[in-house]
Image (cartoon, grey):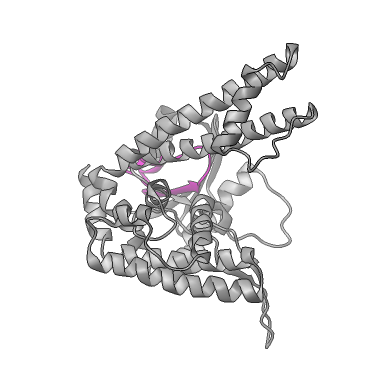
Amino acid sequence: MEKKSKLYVGMDVHKDTVMVALLPAEAPEPTVVKRLPNEASKIRRWLGRISREGEVRACYEASGAGYVLERAMRHWGYECEIVAPSLIPRRPGDRRKHDRKDATELARLYRAGELVTIRIPTEREERVRDVVRCREVFQREILKSRHYILKFLARRGLVYREGRNWTGKHMSWLRALQRDGALEGEDRLVFGEYLALFDYKLGRREELDRRIEALALEPAYREAVGRLCCLKGISTHAAMVLATEIGDFRRFESPGKLMAYVGLVPSEHSSGASRRLGAITKAGNSRVRHVLVQAAWSYRFAPRRGPALSRRQQGQAPKVIAHGWKAQHRLHKVFGRLAFRKNNQIAAVAVARELAGFVWALMQDAGEDTRTNRDAA
């Protein structure tokens, strides 16, 4: 039986259209470059026609289009991969960009093996991840509402000076302003609307927190979340961000690869004998990077097991707890040394990078069980 030749298809996917470029394995240029409607039936019909000539291997960039087309093509029996846009090679002198060129370049680079593919989550993983991301959206919305309230009151000369904002006493002061008639007419109406919007967002965030707590107890996430919560500064929500965004931690061969994935490694511009390191790359997953940096600030305090950390560590294996204790000692020393030489911000980022290494090591022997439970769920 004659072996089929490979056909490489680059796709530039948009909401309404898909630009496709067909590049056979031995052809110097694409044989077909055309625009298709982004409709499953028409894309499947076109793939069916070209698959008579060889084995189809397609790719497209990760974007707002999601994984719908990739999953459909897998279901139809075609190989399809999604590539990381930030890691696509670009020619420095190239200043032209359009759909035909993008699809052609994707096909060419995909055939040459120069594209970096991303991990495709299952549909269940994607749904859970969106719940966690939704909670982050409400967190940002709450911050906006806080600004609305404080700036409005400042314009009316009402500033809270008896302590920090958004404490229990500050909230009581805000309620008193609404109740005691410190604001009149339209001002009272505006302040009441801002405060009602703030309360609504708080209520929705609390509901999402309860849902995330319930999801963290499911077999697919229970072990991973339990282990991650043994690290200082990582609560259930932070652990769910790490678990849902990274997925299988064992796909990273070394801790350095995880650090690079979350953009915590320094940029570099070296030549000859000179070596110049710059700011962190900030490439990859920004949500994971944010969680790690926020957790890193807790290591400026001396190592200790507080009540919250002790509760999170209940029922965990002794080696997992020991790993978290080792991380506290190591990262506290790093934070203190760098904060003395540099500043707290630089120290926090450096500690976040090392914390990523501790996360990687902690999750290596849990990867197989976690993946098995997720697949079963």
Quadrant position of residue 281: bottom right
How many tags in the picture? Answer: 0
* Magenta span contains residue 69: yes
Residue located farthest toward the top when viewing the structure as drawn: 185
- The relative height of residue 211 versus residue 250 in the rendered view (above or below) is above
Tell me residue 318's x, y (percent).
23, 66
- The relative height of residue 159 versus residue 268 in the rendered view (above or below) is above
Tell me residue 314's x, y (percent).
25, 55
Q: Is residue 240 left or right of residue 110?
A: left
* Magenta span contains residue 11: no
Tell me residue 50's x, y (percent).
41, 42
Quadrant position of residue 269: bottom right
**Nearer to the camera, 324 or 185:** 185
**Nearer to the camera, 214 or 322:** 322
Q: Residue at x 79, y 29 (%)?
A: 157
Residue located farthest toward the bottom when viewing the structure as drawn: 273
Q: Is residue 322 left or right of residue 8?
A: left
Can you see residue 278? yes
Q: Is residue 129 left or right of residue 161?
A: left
**Nearer to the camera, 256 or 297:** 297
- The relative height of residue 200 versus residue 231 in the rendered view (above or below) is above
Q: Residue at x 36, y 56 (%)?
A: 309
- The relative height of residue 364 versus residue 19 in the rendered view (above or below) is below
Q: Is residue 78 left or right of residue 373?
A: right
Tell me residue 289's x, y (percent).
52, 56
Q: Which residues are magenta?
A: 50-79
Q: Residue at x 25, y 69 (%)?
A: 319
